[in-house]
Amino acid sequence: MAIAVNDEFKVSNDAEQQLASLLQEENSEDIQGVRIYVAGSGCSGTQWGMTFADKVADDDAVLESGKLNIYVDPQCLATLDGVEIDYVNGPQGPSFVFNNTKAPDSGGCGSCGSATSGGGCS
């Protein structure tokens, strides 16, 4: 199923260019595109990850952005509504970030992973 990226989420121009560049550098016929997946959830909400994809599952959404194919399983796709993937140069260096424009600004759920909260959320 082909869905325009802008119908579900956005990929910034910087992120699209960087992903396309990484795919070109990888230069493997086995790699079909980039897979986005849910890496977990916690105090700040859903956490996503990306990896190279060498195959497409029958129920994957195939999101096309320029020359870049992005593969997302249906459960993950539902969590991406309002998310923009960007490529920024932050304090730890350049990285991809997932900005959720629809997430409520709840301030999280206290301190997470700290020694005082026993590693959980307080």
Image (tube, helix red, strand yellow):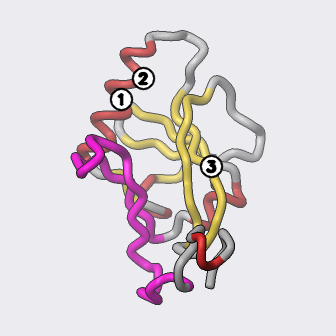
Question: Vertical placement of 67 versus 71: above or below?
Answer: above
Q: Is disc 3 placed on a helix, strand or loop?
A: strand
**As shown in the figure, which amino acid type bears the numbered disc 3?**
Tyr
Indicate whether residue 50 is drawn in magenta. no
**Amino acid type, label 1:** Ala
In the picture of the structure, the residue carrying the numbered disc 1 is 20
Residue 114 lies left or right of residue 21; in this view the side is right
Q: Position of residue 83 (x, y in %)?
A: 44, 65
The mark that comes first in sequence, 3 or 1, is 1
Residue type (three-letter) at the residue carrying disc 2: Leu
Q: Are marks 2 and 1 in contact (CB under 8 Å)?
A: yes
Whether residue 108 appears in magenta in the rendering, the answer is yes
For mark 2, does the 10 Å Cα neighbourhood hold few (<14), some (14 to 19), or many (20 or more) residues? Answer: some
Q: Which mark is residue 37?
A: 3
* Residue at image location 63% in from the left, 78% down from the top: 117
Span colored in magenta: 82-109
- In the image shown, does 52 or 121 lie closer to the viewer? 121
Q: Is residue 25 left or right of residue 46?
A: left
Label 3 to label 1: alpha-carbon separation = 18 Å
Q: For residue 98, what is the image quadrant?
A: bottom left
Tell me the number on the disc at residue 23: 2
Q: Residue at x 37, y 34 (%)?
A: 19
In the image, residue 95 sits, relative to residue 38, either above or below, namely above
